[in-house]
Amino acid sequence: MSKRGILIVISGFSGAGKGTIVRHLMEKYDNYALSISMTTRPPRKQEQDGVDYFFVTKERFERAIEEEGLIEYAAYCGNYYGTPRAYVEEQLSQGKDVILEIEIQGALKIKKKFPECLLLFVMPPNVEELRKRLVGRGTETLEVIEERLKRASEESEGIEAYDYIIRNEEIEESVEQAHRLVEAARSAPARQEAFIRKIREELKTIAKGAE
Ligand code: 5GP
């Protein structure tokens, strides 16, 4: 059986560039699997059902909660967002490093349920840049942009709960940084338990032989 993958949470303020980092990680490396969330938010122009999100009604979302089909969910700016359970568990057990691109409330729930997960937070180089990116994206009204900036201010209070922050100044460098952090996380003792156990047992056997 292949080794269990790492569960990676990538959060960041709306417009900080986390979506772009994730897209590049997926294109460049083959160890990642990207979880597709379920949401009650209406699709944006270019978004496709089953690709960007599973776009569902509030009733369908609430049924998924009742059936325990989501490993976490949260309300964000008036809509529900949640992570379907089956795909994440299946990919982790196949050894894939699974990326959840989710906001902070969900991230904290994941940390509680899966303490060995890796939490990354993507920051813009400065706040002016954040506003520029949100406006430049052209997918939201000014009202929604203001709401998202307000939300960013609230979310900024929780950043210390994350393992690492990525200061997104240059996209290629941010992608490499994220990948290096995942590779480093693989070496943590908590993720090497079987290997540590094996070496310990071998050492014990040798020590016994020498008695
Ligand atoms: P957007 O509407 O811009 O696509 O997403 C809004 C926020 O919801 C983003 O911060 C995004 O990362 C987050 N989000 C997307 N999917 C999920 C999810 O499954 N769970 C949680 N908790 N947040 C999510």
Image (spheres, helix red, strand yellow):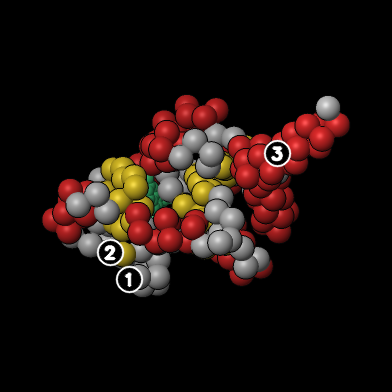
Write down the quadrant of residue 40 in the picture.
bottom left
CB of mark 2 near ligand 1 (< 8 Å): no
Q: Rounded to the nearest whole Å, what is the CA distance between mark 2 and mark 3?
A: 50 Å
- Foreground pick, 134 / 118: 118
In the picture, measured across the screen, residue 148 lies left or right of residue 77, that is: right
Q: Marks 1 and 3: which is nearer the front?
A: 3
Q: Quadrant of the C terminus?
A: top right
Which residue: 38% across, 41% down? 106
Q: Residues within 10 Å of mark 3 (few under 14, many from 20)?
A: few
The answer to which image quadrant residue 120 occupies is: top right
Q: Residues within 10 Å of mark 2 (few under 14, many from 20)?
A: many
- Which image quarter: residue 85? bottom left
Question: Viewer-proximal residue, 93 or 182?
Answer: 93
Residue 10 is situated, as x and y percent measured from the top left of the image, at: 52, 47
Do the residues under discs 1 and 3 have CB atoms within 8 angstroms? no
Dot 1 falls on a residue whose secondary structure is loop
**Where in the figure is residue 111, as x and y percent of width and height?**
46, 36
Q: Which residue is mark 2?
A: 55
Q: Residue at x 61, y 63 (%)?
A: 31
The number of numbered discs placed on residues in the rendered structure image is: 3
Q: Looking at the image, is mark 2 or mark 3 earlier in the sequence? A: 2
Mark 1, residue position: 49
Between the C-alphas of marks 1 and 2, the distance is 6 Å
Q: Which mark is residue 201?
A: 3
Circle 2 SS class: strand
Residue 24 at least partly seen = no
Give the amino acid at mark 3: Glu
Q: Distance between the Cα atoms at labels 1 and 3?
A: 50 Å
What amino acid does circle 2 point to? Phe
Q: Tell me: 13 left or right of 43.
A: right
* Residue appearing at x 31%, y 64% in the figure: 54
Q: Are marks 1 and 2 in contact (CB under 8 Å)?
A: yes
